[in-house]
Image (tube, rainbow, N blue to C red):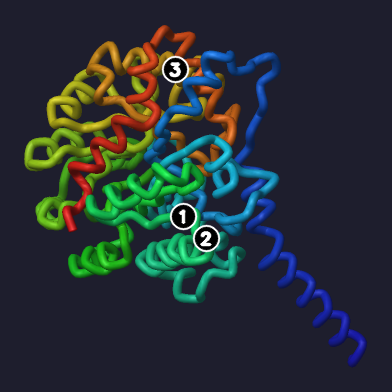
């Protein structure tokens, strides 16, 4: 009996160690892949231009995974060394807090959640296993800890913060600005007061929905495809008071329409594709794009196959070209979705390949500077909270 107990205890211990120290990393490596393209190299023109760019990306999901943001990893798409190598200026780090089982772009129920097990496997605090709000707060702490541990990361919450950071960066091109966003206000757990908690935690960009409907309204991949709920309308008004940037990524067409009817401030779509180059239930129609541009908003074009049709940089550039032709170049930005359980053809360190693709799409150097980061910085200068 003692031997049986000993063997059982040993097996249980080994299983626990495997779960808490390997499962999260294995999941990460299997879901965030970079498939390097053969025979696609940046030109001398791209190298010269890229070194002079301000690069800013509106959406990456690095905080979801069991990694140290400040250290280089052999897998994945975003970490501090990769951002520095890619000549980034600013990265928006997103908190992902719930993802349904059998995820698809057509219809997902809100009744299941894949991230409970991942939160446990990542050794997140016990309360995060069962609370979406706690998961959001924990991911804000992960980013703040990285900032505290690295002199190269600057946490940006206000217009003053951004202007100060940009002054610092003139003398230090290895500094990276970090802004915190959230992918879905199911994080509120239906409690209006939790919006204050998210704001106090540093969230300045907030997506309303993810792949399923929530208390705010309908997702493009939800079951109802509805617009704003009454609770959602209250939240939108409060977000505007706090000068929180509203992110309409994943929103249903009706939700986007109803939000644009009531907001007074510009919105963003942090990561998306456009139906003009790749038809998908997730992607935006010309009418929706035009409505967002009329609002003064910004469209972050994604880097993954389901957004632009393939992982080749030329497909990303083609979607950017289409959107620029429709709206004007000032409304176009980068929304990579790096580390968002997607496959791409380059990571942050090799984003120069997109610079090359934009050159091949016959964008001017001035236009490329706007697309790669100028538009994003200008938008944030005017739409982050003032203080």
Q: Mark 3 highlights which residue?
A: 317
> Measuring 26% from the left and 31% from the top, which residue is drawn there?
298
Circle 3/circle 1 CB separation < 8 Å: no
Q: CA distance from mark 3 to mark 1?
A: 29 Å
Left or right of 149 in this view: 234:
left
In percent of the image, x 47 and y 38: which residue is there? Answer: 88
For residue 9, which quarter of the picture? bottom right
Give x and y (percent) for residue 251.
Answer: 28, 39
Residue shown at 25%/62% (left/top)?
A: 199
Circle 1 residue: 153
Question: Where 371 sits versus 237, above or below?
Answer: above
Tag 2–tag 1 contact (CB < 8 Å) = yes
Q: Which residue is mark 2?
A: 150
Q: Is residue 366 above or below residue 86?
A: above
Is residue 192 visible in this depiction of the protein? Answer: yes
Q: Residue 279 at what x, y percent from top left?
A: 38, 18
Secondary structure of the residue carrying tag 1 is: strand
For the C terminus, the quadrant is bottom left
Task: Please tell me whether mark 3 or mark 1 is closer to you in this view.
Answer: 1
Label 3: few (<14), some (14–19) or many (≥20) C-alpha neighbours in 10 Å: many
């Amino acid at each position: 009996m003692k031997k049986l107990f000993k063997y059982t205890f040993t097996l249980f211990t080994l299983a626990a160690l495997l779960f808490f120290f390997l499962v999260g990393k294995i999941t990460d490596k299997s879901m965030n892949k970079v498939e390097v393209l053969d025979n696609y190299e940046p030109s001398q023109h791209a190298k010269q231009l890229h070194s002079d760019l301000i690069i800013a990306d509106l959406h990456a999901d690095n905080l979801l995974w069991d990694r140290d943001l400040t250290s280089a990893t052999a897998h994945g798409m975003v970490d501090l060394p990769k951002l520095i190598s890619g000549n980034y200026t600013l990265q928006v780090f997103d908190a992902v807090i719930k993802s349904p089982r059998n995820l698809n772009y057509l219809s997902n129920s809100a009744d299941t959640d894949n991230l409970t097990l991942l939160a446990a496997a990542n050794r997140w605090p016990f309360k995060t296993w069962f609370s979406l709000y706690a998961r959001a707060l924990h991911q804000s702490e992960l980013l703040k800890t990285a900032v505290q541990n690295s002199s190269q990361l600057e946490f940006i919450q206000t217009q003053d913060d951004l202007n100060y950071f940009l002054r610092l960066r003139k003398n230090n091109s290895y500094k990276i600005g970090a802004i915190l966003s959230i992918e879905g206000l199911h994080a509120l757990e239906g409690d209006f007061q939790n919006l204050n908690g998210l704001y106090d935690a540093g969230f300045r960009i907030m997506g309303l929905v993810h792949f399923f409907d929530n208390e705010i309204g309908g997702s493009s991949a939800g079951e109802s495809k509805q617009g704003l709920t009454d609770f959602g309308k209250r939240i939108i008004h409060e977000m505007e008071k706090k000068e929180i940037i509203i992110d309409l990524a994943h929103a249903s067409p009706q939700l986007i329409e109803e939000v644009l009817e009531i907001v007074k401030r510009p919105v963003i779509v942090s990561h998306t594709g456009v139906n003009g180059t790749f038809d998908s239930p997730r992607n935006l129609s010309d009418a929706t794009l035009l409505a967002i541009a009329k609002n003064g908003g910004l469209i972050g074009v994604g880097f993954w196959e389901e957004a632009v049709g393939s992982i080749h940089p030329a497909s990303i550039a083609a979607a950017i070209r289409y959107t620029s032709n429709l709206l004007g170049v000032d409304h176009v930005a980068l929304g990579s979705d790096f580390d968002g359980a997607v496959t791409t053809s380059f990571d942050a360190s090799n984003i120069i390949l997109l610079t090359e693709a934009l050159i091949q799409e016959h964008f001017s150097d001035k236009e490329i500077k706007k697309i790669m980061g100028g538009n994003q910085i200008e938008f944030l200068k005017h739409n982050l909270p003032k203080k």
